[in-house]
Image: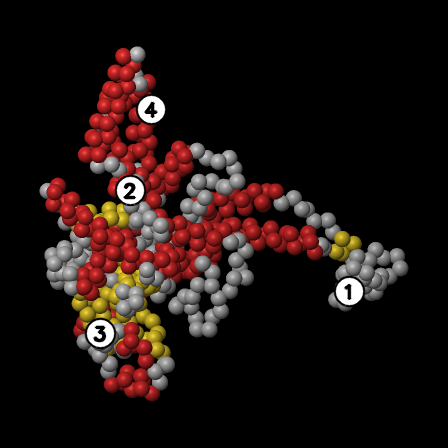
């Protein structure tokens, strides 16, 4: 075993030891919010059970949170982002933006035509519990991009010198015959080659991981390794912005900790209370429906052989009372009210029904905008992490793969300076609602203070309309160019002048 493999394995063991400290809490979140989830740290042959799960509020809320978040960050029917140039010269910047618009559309089309949405939804289920992990790699000719969600129960991560995840590994069992398919170019030792030839379906333990190479400070570089039984099967180095193959977004994270805390983990006390209340209500309902009886121990009635049912004949001794039902209190209003409040708290913690329940009075557009803006404020911290830890790295990674596949190394990387990513998701636009409402309120008040013509005199419509179009996500190509607006204004002025002259003649 080489020194590099020893150091790699040692860091994995230490990170795994720290990760295992949170295994009990994560397991509880899976039990109540994502049941039947496979866990690698479970005992061999241990059966997953759901007989302790009585309330499904957290289960449905987690699914809804993952679906809504996916639509917030990468909507299927809208443009999730656009690439913008950072050039100072306006003419060169406009030309560069036209080129970047085509690149943005290429990245979006390739991503939408892959397995991205299914893998991202799987990742967001773990994100709702703590941290989600997903890799972006080269695929096949038919699907150039391949996305894979990594299970939170298998991944072992570690933080680097600047508090970011720079070490991501997992130990898993794979079929020996699939090693060369999964990692082309791997060096196969003699012992492993013998196992592959004798029994290709035999499972072997393989440790794979990616680690940031800090030997080069001014250039991003990552090392990918595959280790089996202390032997290095594969070592690959990638360099450049976007060379990291994984994204690891967290809902929230405490400084110095690797795994994050998701809504399901933070709402775990309420989830447990709701589950206990639901169990008590079901047991009480069972007593009411089945009933409880008492009988005289007269030597005639045998409760072990008696059958309670329609038309049943139950013998009893002369003078005894036989079966006598007991009255069971059936007032469950307090328990129902407490359960409803607890379920509402769980939904609120997991950002479900932010616009309220359906079936009530239809809301105005202003109220919907305000509620959407409130939801955006509540998710400001988590959404910021989704942008910096998911959207931006994924776009940079996709562009890095396209440049590597097409040989377009002359185009610059997405570095946030020369080329930056501007998110256009619904949640980003919702965060701009406050700004829009302030400006619209100003336009409402201005005529009251300065007269009906104050808005035309004070507000530059040529600048306000493009600004509003950008804020609400309106397609800027549908706006009239400056030349056409000036020509239309001149035609309107001529028409009004002609009408005025006609009225003077009359």
Q: CA distance from mark 1 to mark 3?
A: 72 Å
Q: In this view of the protein, which residue sits in the foreground, 385 or 294?
A: 385
Q: Earlier in the sequence, mark 2 or mark 1?
A: 1
**Helix, strand or loop status at disc 3:** strand
Q: Which residue has dot 4 on it? A: 444
Q: Residue at x 73, y 49 (%)?
A: 327
Q: Earlier in the sequence, mark 3 or mark 4?
A: 3
Q: Which residue has dot 3 on it? A: 234
> Residue 475's mark?
2
Q: Quadrant of the C terminus?
A: top left
Residue 445 lies, in percent from the top left, at 32, 22
* Whether residue 306 is situated above or below residue 445 in the rendered picture: below
Between circles 2 and 1, the one closer to the viewer is 2
Between circles 3 and 2, the one closer to the viewer is 2
Q: Earlier in the sequence, mark 4 or mark 1?
A: 1
Label 4 Cα neighbours within 10 Å, binned few <14 / some 14-19 / many ≥20: few
**Helix, strand or loop status at disc 1:** loop
Q: Which residue has dot 1 on it? A: 306
**Helix, strand or loop status at disc 4:** helix
Label 2 close to label 4 by CB (< 8 Å): no
Q: CA distance from mark 3 to mark 4?
A: 66 Å
Q: In this view of the protein, which residue sits in the foreground, 365 or 29?
A: 365
Between circles 1 and 3, the one closer to the viewer is 3
Residue 246 lies, in percent from the top left, at 27, 61
Label 3 close to label 2 by CB (< 8 Å): no
């Amino acid at each position: 075993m080489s020194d590099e493999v020893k150091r790699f394995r040692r860091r994995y063991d230490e990170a795994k030891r720290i990760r295992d400290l949170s295994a009990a809490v994560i397991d509880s979140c899976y039990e109540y919010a994502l049941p039947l989830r496979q866990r690698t740290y479970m005992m061999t042959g241990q059966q997953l059970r759901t007989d302790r799960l009585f309330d499904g509020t957290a289960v449905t809320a987690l699914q809804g949170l993952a679906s809504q978040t996916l639509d917030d960050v990468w909507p299927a029917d809208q443009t999730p982002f656009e690439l913008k140039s950072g050039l100072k010269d306006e003419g060169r910047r406009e030309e560069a933006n036209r080129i970047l618009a085509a690149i943005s559309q290429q990245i979006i089309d390739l991503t939408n035509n892959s397995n991205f949405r299914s893998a991202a939804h799987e990742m967001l289920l773990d994100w709702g519990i703590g941290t989600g992990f997903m890799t972006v790699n080269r695929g096949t000719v038919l699907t150039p991009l391949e996305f894979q969600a990594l299970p939170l129960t298998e991944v072992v991560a570690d933080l680097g010198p600047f508090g970011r995840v720079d070490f991501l590994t997992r130990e898993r069992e794979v079929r020996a015959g699939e090693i060369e398919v999964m990692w082309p170019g791997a060096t196969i030792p003699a012992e492993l080659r013998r196992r592959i030839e004798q029994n290709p379906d035999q499972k072997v333990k393989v440790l794979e991981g990616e680690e940031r190479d800090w030997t080069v400070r001014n250039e991003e570089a990552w090392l990918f390794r595959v280790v089996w039984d202390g032997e290095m099967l594969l070592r690959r180095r990638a360099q450049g912005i976007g060379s990291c193959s994984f994204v690891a977004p967290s809902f929230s994270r405490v400084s110095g900790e690797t795994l994050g805390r998701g809504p399901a983990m933070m709402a775990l006390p309420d989830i447990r209370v709701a589950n206990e209340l639901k169990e008590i209500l079901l047991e009480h309902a069972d007593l009411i429906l089945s009933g409880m009886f008492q009988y005289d121990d007269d030597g005639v009635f045998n409760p072990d052989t008696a059958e309670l049912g329609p038309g049943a004949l139950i013998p009893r001794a002369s003078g005894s009372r036989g079966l006598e039902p007991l009255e069971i209190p059936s007032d469950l209003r307090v328990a129902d009210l407490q359960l409803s409040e607890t379920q509402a708290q769980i939904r609120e913690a997991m950002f479900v029904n932010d616009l309220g329940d359906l079936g009530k009075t239809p809301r105005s557009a202003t109220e919907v905008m305000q509620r959407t803006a409130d939801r955006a404020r509540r998710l400001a911290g988590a959404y910021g992490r989704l942008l910096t830890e998911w959207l931006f790295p994924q776009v940079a990674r996709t562009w890095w793969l396209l440049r590597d596949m097409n040989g377009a190394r002359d185009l610059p990387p997405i570095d946030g300076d020369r080329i930056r990513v501007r998110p256009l998701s619904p949640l980003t636009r919702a965060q701009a609602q406050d700004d829009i409402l302030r400006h619209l309120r100003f336009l409402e008040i201005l005529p009251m203070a300065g007269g009906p013509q104050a808005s035309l005199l004070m507000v530059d419509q040529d600048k306000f309309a493009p600004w509003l179009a950008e804020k609400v996500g309106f397609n800027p190509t549908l706006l009239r160019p400056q030349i056409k607006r000036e020509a239309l204004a001149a035609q309107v002025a001529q028409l009004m002048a002609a009408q005025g002259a006609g009225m003077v003649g009359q």
